[in-house]
C-alpha cells in the first residue's frame, strides 16, 4: 500500500514538473521535454495501478506499452514539424509561431 | 556467489583482447604491452581541456565501463555461473549496451572539442543503424528458446547452435556487434585516420586508461553475448563448461578484430543505408524463417 | 514491502530530481541527458515495482529517444552549450502556478481516494512476460496492431514533413 502511495506521489510530482516545463518554455524541443515528463508521470501511475490493484489484468501493462508508443510518436512528429519550421524560418521558437493561430 | 569469478574472467578477457588488438593493429605480439602502456598512462598527467562540460567529461568513461559490466552481469559463463539470472536477460543485455552510446555522446560533448563532438554524434547515428537489427535478431533467438532468460537461450542450443540454425541472424548479429563496440570497419566515433581519435582524442592519463579498459571490457562482453546467443554458450565436449565459454568468447573477439583489418572504414551515410536497406530486411527475414522452421520442424 | 517502498521512493526521487534539472540548466545537452536519466530512473522504479519487462524496455527505449532529442537540440538551439546563460522561458509565474496546482491536485487525489486492499504479490517475471505476450496476441491484439500502424503512419508523415522540397 505504501509503495502505491509513494509511486502516485512521484507520478504527481513528475506531472507537475512536466506541466511547468511545457507551459514555461519557449522552444519546441523544450516543450516536448515537458510533455515527455508528464507522460513519464502517467506511466509511473499506470505501473503502480497494475502492480498494486490488478496484478492479474495485463491490459494495464499493455496500456504502458501504448504510452511508450505515444512518446515515440510525439518525438517523431514533433521533430518532423520542427525540421520543417527550422527550414522555413530558421528557428523553432514558439513565440514567433503566431501565424499558426487559426 | 559468482560475482568474483565473472569479474575476474572479464578482466582477464579484457587483457587478452588488448594484447590481441595490439597484435592485429601493429603486427607485433607483445604479451606485456597492455600493462606497460597502462602504467605509462597512469604516470601521465590527465589534462582537462579548457571550458569542459566537467560532469560529462568525468562521467563518460565511467558510464562506458558501467554499461559493459552491467551487460556482462546477465551473461552466463557456465551452468549457474551468472551474476543475476534475469527473466528478461536477453533484452537487458541490449538495454545496458545502449548506454555505450550515451557514454560516447557524453564524453564526446564533454571536452568542448570539435573532433570529439563529431565522433560522439557519429556514434549516435551508428546506433540508429545497428540497434534495430540487433533487437530483431535477439527476438529470433528468444523465439527458439521460448524465453528471454540467457540461461534458457544457452540450454536451447544444446543440440544445435543458433549459428547453424539461423545463419542469417548470426551474420547480422556479428556485424551489429562490431558496430556496437566500434571496431575497425565501424570505428566512426574514434576514426584514427580522419578524426584524430575522435571521442578519445581529448582524454589523457588515467582517464584515457579507464576509457581503454572500458573499451576492452566492452569487446569481451559483446563477444560473450555472441557466444551465449549463437555459439551455444558453455556447451561442448571434453573440456569443462567455463573453458568452452572462454575459448568461444576469445575466438569471437579475435574474429571481430581480425575481420576489421580487411575492410575499409564505412562512411556514415553508407553505414546507415546498408543497415536500413540490407540489415533490417535480413533481420526481419530471419525472424520469418525461424518462425516457419519452429512451426514445421521444431526447435 | 518496506524495502520495495524504499527502492521505489529512491528511484522516484532521482527521477524527480533529474526532471527538475531538465528545466534548471541552460546547457541543452545537459537538459536532454537529464531527461534521459530521469526516464531511466522511472524504468528502475518499474523494476522496483516488479514490472521487469516494462522496466528493461523503458531503460532501453528512453536512452535512444532522449539522445536523439539531444542532437536535435544541438541542431536547432541558438546556444546549445548554455555558455551565454540565455533565458528561454515565458509566463513563468502562470506556469509555476499551473505546475504546483497540477501536482497538488494529483497528490490530493492519490491521498484522499481509498484504494482498497493492495495486492501483495505479483506473478514472477518469467510468468509475467509470458502472460503479457499472450495478452498482446489475444485480447489486446487490435490495440497493439493499431499502435504499430500508427507508428508507421507517423514515420511516413514526419519524414514527409521534414524532407527538403526539391526545386524544379
Image: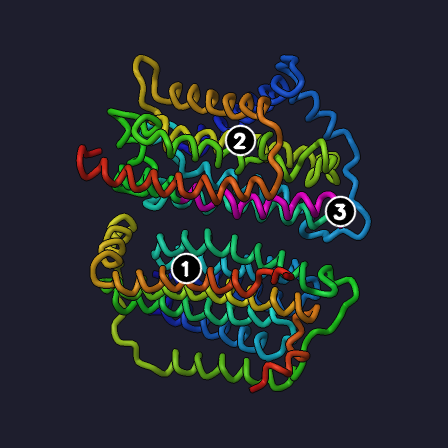
Q: Does label 3 or label 2 sit earlier along the sequence?
A: 3
Q: Which mark is residue C4?
A: none
Residue under label 3: B114
Q: Which residues are magenta?
A: B111-135
What distance separates the C-alpha of mark 1 from that of mark 2? Answer: 34 Å
Residue A29 visible in the snapshot: no
Residue under label 2: B219
- In the rendered image, residue A58, in percent from the top left (x then y), is placed at 26, 62
Q: Are marks 3 and 2 on the same chain?
A: yes
Q: Residue at x 31, y 12 (%)?
A: B238
Q: Are marks 1 and 2 on the same chain?
A: no
Task: Report the chain holding disc 3.
Answer: B
Which mark is nearer the camera, 1 or 2?
Answer: 1
Where is B183 relative to B34, above or below?
Answer: below
Where is B125 relative to C119, above or below?
Answer: above
Question: Which residue is at the front of the view, B135 or B205?
Answer: B135
Q: What element does badge 3 sit on?
A: helix
Q: What element does badge 2 sit on?
A: helix
Q: Residue at x 64, y 21 (%)?
A: B25
Magenta-colored stretch includes residue B134: yes
Q: Which mark is residue C152?
A: 1
Quadrant showing the N terminus of chain B: top left
Magenta-colored stretch includes residue B195: no
Q: Residue at x 39, y 78 (%)?
A: C110
Q: What element does badge 1 sit on?
A: helix
Task: Report the chain holding disc 1.
Answer: C
Amino acid at each position: 500500500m505504501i509503495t502505491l502511495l509513494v509511486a502516485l506521489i512521484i507520478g504527481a510530482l513528475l506531472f507537475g514538473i512536466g506541466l511547468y516545463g511545457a507551459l514555461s518554455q519557449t522552444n519546441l524541443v523544450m516543450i516536448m521535454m515537458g510533455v515527455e515528463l508528464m507522460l513519464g508521470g502517467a506511466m509511473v501511475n499506470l505501473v503502480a495501478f497494475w502492480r498494486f490493484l490488478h496484478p492479474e489484468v495485463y491490459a494495464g501493462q499493455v496500456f504502458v506499452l501504448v504510452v511508450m508508443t505515444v512518446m515515440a510518436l510525439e518525438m517523431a512528429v514533433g521533430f518532423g514539424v520542427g525540421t520543417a519550421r527550422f527550414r522555413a524560418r530558421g528557428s523553432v521558437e514558439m513565440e514567433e509561431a503566431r501565424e499558426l493561430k487559426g | 556467489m559468482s560475482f568474483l569469478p565473472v569479474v575476474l574472467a572479464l578482466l582477464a578477457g579484457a587483457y587478452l583482447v588488448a594484447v590481441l588488438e595490439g597484435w592485429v593493429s601493429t603486427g607485433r605480439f607483445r604479451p606485456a604491452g597492455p600493462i606497460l602502456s597502462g602504467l605509462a598512462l597512469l604516470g601521465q598527467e590527465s589534462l582537462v581541456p579548457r571550458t569542459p562540460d566537467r560532469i560529462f567529461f568525468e562521467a563518460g568513461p565511467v558510464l562506458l565501463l558501467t554499461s559493459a559490466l552491467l551487460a556482462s552481469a546477465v551473461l552466463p559463463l557456465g551452468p549457474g555461473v551468472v551474476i543475476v539470472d534475469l527473466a528478461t536477460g536477453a533484452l537487458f543485455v541490449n538495454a545496458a549496451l545502449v548506454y555505450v552510446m550515451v557514454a560516447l555522446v557524453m564524453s564526446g560533448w564533454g571536452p568542448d572539442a570539435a573532433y570529439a563532438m563529431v565522433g560522439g554524434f557519429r556514434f549516435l547515428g551508428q546506433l540508429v543503424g545497428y540497434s534495430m537489427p540487433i533487437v530483431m535478431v535477439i527476438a529470433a533467438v528468444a523465439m527458439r528458446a521460448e524465453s528471454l532468460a540467457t540461461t534458457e537461450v544457452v540450454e536451447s542450443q544444446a543440440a544445435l547452435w543458433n549459428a547453424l540454425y539461423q545463419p542469417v541472424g548470426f551474420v547480422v548479429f556479428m556485424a551489429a556487434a562490431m558496430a556496437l563496440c566500434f571496431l575497425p570497419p565501424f570505428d566512426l566515433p574514434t576514426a584514427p585516420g580522419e578524426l584524430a581519435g575522435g571521442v578519445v582524442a581529448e582524454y589523457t592519463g588515467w582517464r584515457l586508461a579507464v576509457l581503454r579498459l572500458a573499451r576492452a571490457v566492452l569487446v569481451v562482453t559483446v563477444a560473450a553475448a555472441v557466444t551465449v546467443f549463437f555459439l551455444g554458450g558453455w556447451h561442448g565436449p571434453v573440456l569443462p563448461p567455463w573453458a568452452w565459454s572462454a575459448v568461444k568468447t576469445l575466438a569471437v573477439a579475435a574474429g571481430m578484430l581480425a575481420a576489421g583489418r580487411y575492410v575499409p572504414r564505412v562512411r556514415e551515410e553508407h553505414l546507415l543505408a546498408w543497415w536500413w536497406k540490407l540489415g533490417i530486411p535480413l533481420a526481419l527475414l530471419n525472424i520469418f524463417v525461424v518462425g516457419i522452421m519452429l512451426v514445421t520442424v521444431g526447435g | 514491502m518496506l524495502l520495495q517502498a524504499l527502492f521505489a521512493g529512491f528511484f522516484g526521487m532521482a527521477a524527480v530530481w533529474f526532471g527538475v534539472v531538465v528545466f534548471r540548466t541552460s546547457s541543452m545537452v545537459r537538459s536532454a541527458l537529464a531527461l534521459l536519466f530521469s526516464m531511466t530512473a522511472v524504468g528502475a522504479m518499474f523494476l522496483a515495482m516488479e514490472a521487469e519487462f516494462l522496466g528493461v524496455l523503458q531503460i532501453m527505449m528512453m536512452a535512444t529517444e532522449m539522445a536523439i532529442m539531444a542532437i536535435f537540440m544541438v541542431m536547432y538551439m541558438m546556444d546549445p552549450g548554455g555558455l551565454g546563460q540565455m533565458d528561454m522561458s515565458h509566463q513563468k509565474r502562470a506556469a509555476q502556478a499551473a505546475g504546483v496546482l497540477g501536482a497538488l491536485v494529483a497528490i490530493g487525489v492519490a491521498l484522499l481516494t481509498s484504494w482498497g486492499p493492495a495486492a501483495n504479490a505479483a506473478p514472477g517475471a518469467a510468468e509475467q512476460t509470458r502472460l503479457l505476450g499472450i495478452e498482446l496476441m489475444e485480447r489486446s491484439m487490435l490495440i497493439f496492431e493499431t499502435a504499430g500502424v500508427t507508428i508507421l503512419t507517423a514515420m511516413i508523415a514526419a519524414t514527409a514533413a521534414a524532407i527538403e522540397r526539391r526545386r524544379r
